Amino acid sequence: MFIKIGEKIKNHREAKGVSQDDFAKYLGVTCKEVLKWENGDLYPSLELIPVIAGYFGVSTDDLMCMEMFSNEDKIKAYTDSFYEKVAAGNIREATETIREAILHFPDEYRLRVLLMYGLYLSCDRPAAVKHYSGELLEIGDDILSHCTEDPIRLEAKRLLCLHYCEDLNDTEKAREIAMSLPGRKICREDMLPIISEGDAKLSAIQENISSYTSLLASAIVSYTENAGNLGTREKIEFCELAKTLREMIYPNGDIYEGAYLHMTLLRDLAVLYMAADEQEKALDCLESCAHCAADFDALPKSTMHTSPLVNRLPFSKQQLQIPSKNRKTPLRDIFMNEIIALQCFEPVRYSARIPQICAIFRQEK
């Protein structure tokens, strides 16, 4: 990360060969104050900044690390551009954007883990895995060996875990990495509601309501997919339960970050209803699925939740939860190309409702 003002003072003082005591005497302060500056426990008063800068022969901007703000703006611009290109499905362009950013900021692990993510998304076929896997693993190893920032290290582990499992079919290695991750009880989601106060406490609770709702609904669907003893009617019952859960928490339809997962839930329900020979219910699910996709696509880049339990909780489109590599948006593309095009819907392909469902995207523009 960037050098703080105390570290700048210490570096300039040592380069000039001046003791803390002599430096303090020159400024008319105590040696203890200088020590606190250099340890980051205290900042010099504003009137001393020009004096200190003049003493070291540097600009006040240099002393106050103003380049930090300039660099942070540039890094944010690169990061935003990366996520926008990923959201649009332009993975190659997104990856090249981060490669360019790393050329400018080679020591930024924040950018390196984004490159890992871009490489992971690029591994969408065997030839691509062969091409990108070595670099992805090398970056991951470098981050885990040298980076000290926990969020970056955890994200690197997450990507390595997924890459070993999905791309390299090495479930043993993936499990080894997964077991090194902290348990759910050792996470910020559990701690922030405890240690925060006022609005910050409420926001932390609301974020938990949102994330745990998505987690529980997804777990229910995963159970129906993996419990081999369930019949079609039982699977429908459980998927309807997951659907009801989301609708209870988001009565205003502001699912937002869970929009993709809700679409897949509605898809699964539609498929099950087709298997149960309940075509109208299947079409109802497809219609709800189309509305979910169109509503999400129509959102601005950032907005606020409106449902009572999550009211005014902020949302950015970068928070869209897609667990697979299918990061392309608009969600309309996923609905039209991967959901309604499923073979199981062939019996209703020429239903009068299909053109009406597809027309939802034109209505929402």
Image: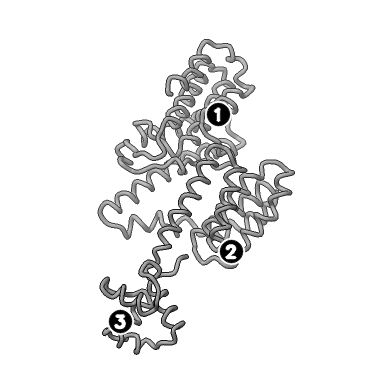
Q: Residue 49's x, y, as percent?
A: 31, 73
Q: CA distance from mark 2 to mark 3?
A: 37 Å
Q: Amino acid at mark 3?
A: Glu
Q: Amino acid at mark 1?
A: Asp
Q: Which residue is mark 3?
A: 33
Q: Which residue is mark 2?
A: 144
Q: In the image, which is nearer the foreground, mark 1 or mark 3?
A: 3
Say which element carries label 1. Answer: helix
Q: Residue 178's x, y, as percent?
A: 58, 56
Q: Are marks 1 and 3 in contact (CB under 8 Å)?
A: no
Residue at 34 percent of width and 51 percent of height: 204
Q: Are marks 1 and 2 in contact (CB under 8 Å)?
A: no
Could you say which quadrant of the image residue 294 lies in?
top left
Could you say which quadrant of the image residue 58 lies in?
bottom left
Q: Is residue 191 left or right of residue 165?
A: left
Q: Earlier in the sequence, mark 1 or mark 3?
A: 3
In this rendering, the answer to whether 249 lies above or below 140 is above
Taking depth in this image into account, of 315 and 272 the one nearest to the observer is 315
Say which element carries label 2. Answer: helix
Residue at 52 percent of width and 10 percent of height: 352
Q: Amino acid at mark 2?
A: Leu
In this rendering, the answer to whether 345 lies above or below 310 is above
Taking depth in this image into account, of 279 and 264 the one nearest to the observer is 264
Q: Earlier in the sequence, mark 2 or mark 3?
A: 3
Q: Which residue is mark 1?
A: 333
Could you say which quadrant of the image residue 249 lies in?
top left
**Is residue 315 visible in the rendered structure shown here?**
yes
